[in-house]
Amino acid sequence: MSEPAPLAFQTTPVHPLFGVEVLGCDLRRAGEPDLYAAIRQAFEVSSLLLFRDQHLNDEDHLAFAKLFGPIEDRSNIRMDGAARISGVSNETGDGGVMDEANLRLLDLQANMLWHTDSTFLPVPALANILQARVVPSEGGATEFASTRAGFNGLAPELQERLRSLSFHHRYSHSRARVDPELAKLKRFTMWPDTEWRAVWANPVTGEEALYIASHVFAVSGMQAEEGAALVDELIAAMTQPAAVYVHQWQPGDVLVWDERAVLHRGTPWPYEQPRTLVSVCVSAGEGDGLITMRPGLAA
């Protein structure tokens, strides 16, 4: 491979294993070819990018996300092609906050399981672009772990075994772990189960990452209990405390991470306090290595 071009900005690590803070970058200018090329290079290499003091409006946020690829539409109902921001919030819209028994709040709590976004969709996510708008006085951090670093740390025999396995994903599976009634909602049952290879190789860097999530309900060729035990063992191996980056949000923070190579989860906060993050997921394409993730196709 050729040597990467120098970056158009400075970076500083946020964790010894992965992730950088990008300094001196205005994301409203990210569409400039040289700047986006540098951002994308950092994304491929570091897996997680932090940009502070951005305060993007919805239009700016969507424009930045579209540089990475097509915006994901999880509705499966509206087919108008319109790209929208997704709120990750306990605010009700009338100045209040949700009751702790509210199913939407339970969905937020399900996000506190280690997961990768959109593994349950027919086309999974490449990246999530998440911005903080309202943060509580305490708590509400988001935790991240590199499944590239985690995979590299596994025994070679287990790595080789995982290269031959695939995982079956179902959205309602992760929600059922929080509340059975939550798992019955149409938004969690509207998609058929998906199956993806257990290891995703980055086509730019050649590095491999474990592709796993709390949505995994079965492992190819394994009995249910054996498969569940392996999934739990692997997630635990990926998320050892020393391997986790804990991000304490400030308004205007924007985090971009590689869904092919990063696990994440939310953490609790005082639910009487509002917390609003806004998210845009970008779908993976064939150039992102998606074709190699379909079981039965040559890697």
Image: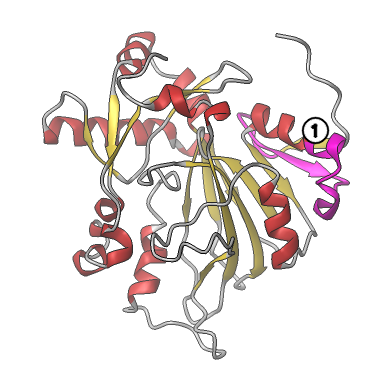
From the viewer's perspective, is residue 257 above or below residue 273? above
The residue shown at (30%, 14%) is 161
The residue shown at (70%, 44%) is 67
User: Is residue 7 at least partly visible in the picture?
Assistant: yes
Residue closer to the observer: 68 or 128: 68
State which quadrant residue 187 falls in: bottom left
Q: Please state the horizontal and vertical placement of residue 97, each as a whole percent of the image.
A: 49, 83
Classify the position of the N terminus by image quarter: top right
Secondary structure under badge 1? helix
Disc 1 marks a residue whose amino acid type is: Ala
Classify the position of the C terminus by image quarter: top left
Magenta stretch encompasses residue 29: yes
Q: Please state the horizontal and vertical placement of residue 154, each as a whole percent of the image.
A: 40, 18
Label 1 neighbourhood size at 10 Å, few (<14), some (14-19), many (20+)? some
From the viewer's perspective, is residue 61 above or below residue 225? below
State which quadrant residue 236 falls in: top left
Q: Please state the horizontal and vertical placement of residue 225, each as a whole percent of the image.
A: 12, 35
User: Is residue 251 at least partly visible in the picture?
Assistant: no
Magenta stretch encompasses residue 244: no
Judging from the image, the colouring scheme is secondary structure
Q: Which residue is mark 1?
A: 38
Residue closer to the observer: 219 or 253: 219
The residue shown at (35%, 11%) is 160
- What residue span does the magenta drawing correspond to? 14-36
From the viewer's perspective, is residue 206 above or below residue 220? above
Residue closer to the observer: 25 or 28: 28
